[in-house]
Image (cartoon, grey):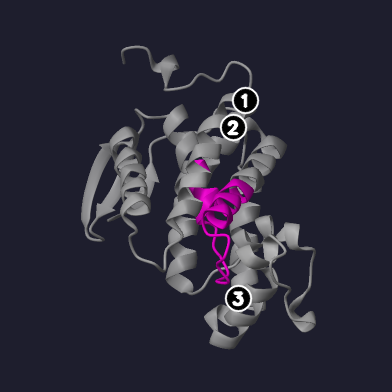
Amino acid sequence: MFFPVYDHNRLNHLPRPYVNLAIITANVLIFVLFQGAGEERAVAASSYSFGLIPVVFFDIRDLAPQLQMLPDWMSLVTYAFLHGNFMHLFGNMLFLWVFGDNVEDAMGHLRYLLFYLLCAAAGGFVYAIMDVSSDAPLIGASGAVSGVVAAYLMLHPRVKVWVLAFGRLPLRLSARWVLGAWIVYQIVNAVIGGDSQVAWMAHIGGLAAGAVLVVFFRRRGVPLFDRNLGNA
């Protein structure tokens, strides 16, 4: 639908969004070094060992011993650092690059890290509980990124964002329209059952978690909904 490119939103509390940069770096390094930059067998092996598989998470089935690398509960987080291909990785990291820095700025480093991991866990749990019998592994940072998107919209709905609509048309729009449309798109696809290759319910879980957690994780004095802008 669109790709965010840049937001006119400076940092007010931090010199650098170190945690957001570290998360992006970790995702890229894992994809390149651990998943063979999308090599099919490496992606499949990592997806079953570290992805979130509902029937395994709920102890309905067991993984083969050679694939069991970590306790099942840890897959609520580990799945969010794996990706199926370059475009899957690029899309998630682009959203994180544009919007994550200001969310980290509003929360601080440690609270942002905890926020990100909790949004990932919430997205994974909602995905799993909505299809307990599924043996398909969930991978991708989309649940966590959805939480970041929800938090950004709650914090900065009036900030202008440059996007490429349909991948080619540059537009400068308020975040409320850009991210609001993106959220509606996720909800509609979750309801009607859109592309089966996309874990829409993980997006919904992440969005809900992000919208709730930002209220409690933001710094004292950081307003919601750009209230500090007044009528400007």
Helix, strand or loop for disc 2: helix
- For the point 54% across and 42% down, which residue is it? 101
Residue 213 disc label: 2
Where does the image place residue 53, in percent across and percent down from the top left? 62, 66
- Determine whether 114 is above or below 139 in the image: above
Helix, strand or loop for disc 1: helix
Mark 2 residue crowding within 10 angstroms, few (<14) / some (14–19) / many (20+): some
* Residue 79 visible somewhere in the drawing: yes
- For the point 50% across and 35% down, which residue is it? 151
- Residue designated by label 3: 32
Residue 143 covered by magenta stretch? yes
Residue 54 disc label: none
Q: CA distance from mark 3 to mark 2?
A: 31 Å
Q: Which residues are magenta?
A: 120-148
Residue 214 falls in which quadrant of the image?
Answer: top right
- Residue designated by label 1: 216
Q: Earlier in the sequence, mark 3 or mark 2?
A: 3
Callouts 2 and 1 close, C-beta under 8 Å: yes
